[in-house]
Image: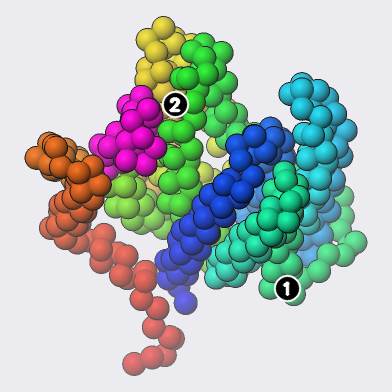
Amino acid sequence: MSVGHKFIRGVAWMLAGGWTEQAINFAVFVTMAKLLGPELYGLLSMAAVFIVLAEALVRESVSEYLIAAHDPGAEDYNATFWLTAALGLVLALALWAASGAIAALYGQPQVAGLIRGLSVTVLLIAFTAVPVAILRREFNFRVLSLRAIAGVVAGGAVGIGMAMAGYGVWSFVGQWIAMITTNVVMAWTAVDWRPGLVTTRSHLVRAGGFGAQVLGLRAAELAAAQLPTLMIGATLGPLATGLYSVSWRLVETLTFLISTPLRMVSQPAFAAVTREGGRAGDLLLDIARLTGVAAFPFFLGLAVVAEPVLRLVFGPEWLGAGPVLSVLAFLGLYLSVAGVQQSFCLAAGRAGEITLLAWGNVLLGGVLILLAARWGLVAITAGFVAAHYLLWIFRFRLVARLGDIPVAPLLTCNILPALAGGVMAAAVILVQRALDGAPLAVSVAASILAGMAVYGGLALLLMRDRIGLFLSYARPAPEAGAA
């Protein structure tokens, strides 16, 4: 089976798993929110900020070394496991030690117990990082997808059961721990490898050095995600912060569903091509062309239907978030395409350079937010998004150099999807205006269907080469010696 075919199959499994996981998660969230109410959910949110941060630092950090390594041996796997376990233990103990101070800062004593109870998940995730890396390296995304679905099902059952039994806010803790525990069990039962003590100082140094760079990258991603919320809260107050937070949550979720499968699968694909002596840069260009076909209509469409969708789903009081969501849709587009470029750098073992660029986005974003603050929320959002686009050319140059390909094809490969997406967006706006006065649900559904039809027609007319590229990867490669 070719790497391209493995890539398409992996993305298909991750898309199916991701959308199913999110649908179940949403149903569980709504059920538990109704059972427990906003106050208890608020207590969980206070604790979850710190738990999610720690989990992100151990998930896909040091273990990324195993994806990039050309031919890792037992010493590499052992070194990565024990380094990740040590990192998880340090973070879990730090959360436990800081829980009282965090609770005092909030003025909510219950938060301390929640943080202590949830800190075990950081260690559990650290213990499962290597099995997950092995599954990714082997393109076993079927197990990873089923694992995620089983986790939310098990967690939901435990959480809802505890809520109905009267355990209050601890129902959230039970849900979280059950979900992570299910993930751990399924990951370990899917791989044959088991940790040992055989390793060397040089293996620890190599894995730790690469892991430290990836930790810096993850910290930059977290900083970028939180920076606008913090600065909007400091400059514009709670109303603007709420409007931005809802808009970002929607874009973050949609970006996760689109970009995470591409990012998770493309990284081992790039690494596999390199190990086989092929040109990973050629695969990067192919994946970039396929990514654009999906990302441009999705996020340009979101930009033009933001206001009616918000009015339909959240109500008229959230209309102020419409322009913010429209601007943030362009950040979602950036994250989808740039995520594949980041995976390429990690697969090439060049985490340091992409980490510097990520921190550049944070610093420039902070400056532009401060400059735009006097013009309000939409200007702040636009400044933050602009920071990513202004520095994007340096990412293009970096991946072109690492892939030994010209910059121009990477820059121009998505002109057609962009043009087709623009025509689609214009068609959606025309349908919305034509249906002005119709029921909102009818207007939204009709405009989305019209956009899909217009973009689909333009893809068949102008992008048959990309459809052919997709089909060539989707078909299994013929076996050697076949007639």
Asked which quadrant contains residue 316, the reply is top left
Residue 71 is at least partly visible in this image: no
Seen in the picture, residue 71 relative to 449 is either above or below; the reply is: below
What range of the chain is rendered magenta? 300-328
Quickly name the residue at label 2.
243
Secondary-structure class at tag 2: helix
Asked which quadrant contains residue 224, the reply is top right
Quickly name the residue at label 1.
189
Residue, x 36% and y 52% (percent of image)? 291
Q: Mark 2 and mark 1: span between their CA atoms?
A: 43 Å
**Disc 2 residue type (three-letter):** Leu
Picture colour scheme? rainbow
Residue, x 40% and y 78% (percent of image)? 476
Query: Position of 259 compared to 155: left or right?
Result: left
Residue 27 is at least partly visible in this image: yes
Residue, x 60% and y 37% (percent of image)? 38
Q: Position of residue 229 (x, y in %)?
A: 53, 24
Q: Nearer the viewer, residue 24 or 136?
A: 24
Seen in the picture, residue 296 relative to 466 is either above or below; the reply is: above
Q: Position of residue 244 (x, y in %)?
A: 45, 27
Point out the tag, 2 or 1, that comes first from the N-terminus. Answer: 1
Q: Quarter of the image containing the C terminus?
A: bottom left
Query: Position of 209 compared to 401: left or right?
Result: right
